[in-house]
């Protein structure tokens, strides 16, 4: 497996992986799948340095997952705090690949001078909690019944990591 910065040619595969979770999981509160064209603005926020990073995991020429960091909030004072997320293709979960991918993203954020990383985890999701805690994220709070998906309310747990 190779982990590298994402390129525009990866956007279709990234979108395919993300769309899987849109239609099958409460891990994201997006409701409708995207086309790669619709995700171009999202993709454009990522750079080769700084706090907004997008990494992909590639195996035998296929993108099998991505991890990214995006601005926590749009206001300037938040610029060194990011929200991180990770998605793997369903056939690649629970194989240690997420840990490898997240480690590369977090190393890049350390080099970029990030101060805090936050992750929002729809509850329950013990696998995601384990992954984040492995990398030093700690529970920071709970938002109750804040997302409506699949005909029910979901809580979201905030996790934070200090650099």
Image: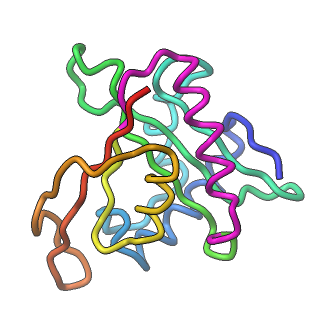
Residue 21 is left or right of residue 14, and the answer is left
Residue at 74%, 37% (x, y): give it. Answer: 4
**Residue 41 on image: x %, y %:** 44, 36
**Residue 152 on image: x %, y %:** 17, 82
Residue 52 is left or right of residue 8, and the answer is left
**Residue 92 on image: x %, y %:** 69, 70
In the image, 151 versus 92, the foreground residue is 92
Magenta segment's dominant SS is helix
Residue 130 is left or right of residue 156, and the answer is right
- Residue 105 on the magenta segment: yes
Quadrant position of residue 26: bottom left
Residue at 31%, 53% (x, y): give it. Answer: 120
> Which residues lie in the magenta part?
93-117
In the image, 34 versus 99, the foreground residue is 99
**Colour scheme in the image?**
rainbow
In the image, 26 versus 31, the foreground residue is 26
In the image, 42 versus 25, the foreground residue is 25
Q: Is residue 125 above or below residue 162?
A: below
Residue at 55%, 57% (x, y): give it. Answer: 15
Q: Is residue 154 above or below residue 134?
A: below
Question: Quadrant location of the C terminus?
Answer: top left
Residue at 38%, 22% (x, y): give it. Answer: 115
Outermost residue on the right side: it is 60
Q: How many tags in the picture? A: 0
């Amino acid at each position: 497996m190779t982990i590298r910065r994402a390129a525009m040619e990866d956007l279709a595969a990234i979108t395919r992986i993300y769309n899987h979770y849109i239609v099958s999981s409460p891990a994201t509160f997006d409701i409708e799948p995207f086309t790669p064209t619709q995700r171009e603005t999202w993709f454009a926020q990522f750079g080769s340095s700084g706090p907004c990073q997008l990494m992909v995991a590639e195996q035998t020429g296929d993108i099998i997952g991505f991890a990214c960091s995006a601005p926590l909030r749009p206001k300037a004072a938040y610029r060194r705090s990011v929200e991180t997320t990770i998605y793997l293709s369903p056939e690649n979960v629970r194989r240690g690949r997420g840990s490898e991918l997240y480690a590369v993203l977090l190393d890049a954020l350390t080099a970029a001078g990030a101060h805090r990383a936050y992750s929002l985890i729809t509850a329950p999701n013990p696998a995601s909690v384990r992954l984040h805690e492995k990398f030093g994220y700690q529970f920071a709070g709970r938002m109750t019944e804040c997302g409506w998906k699949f005909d029910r309310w979901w809580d979201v747990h905030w996790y934070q990591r200090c650099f």
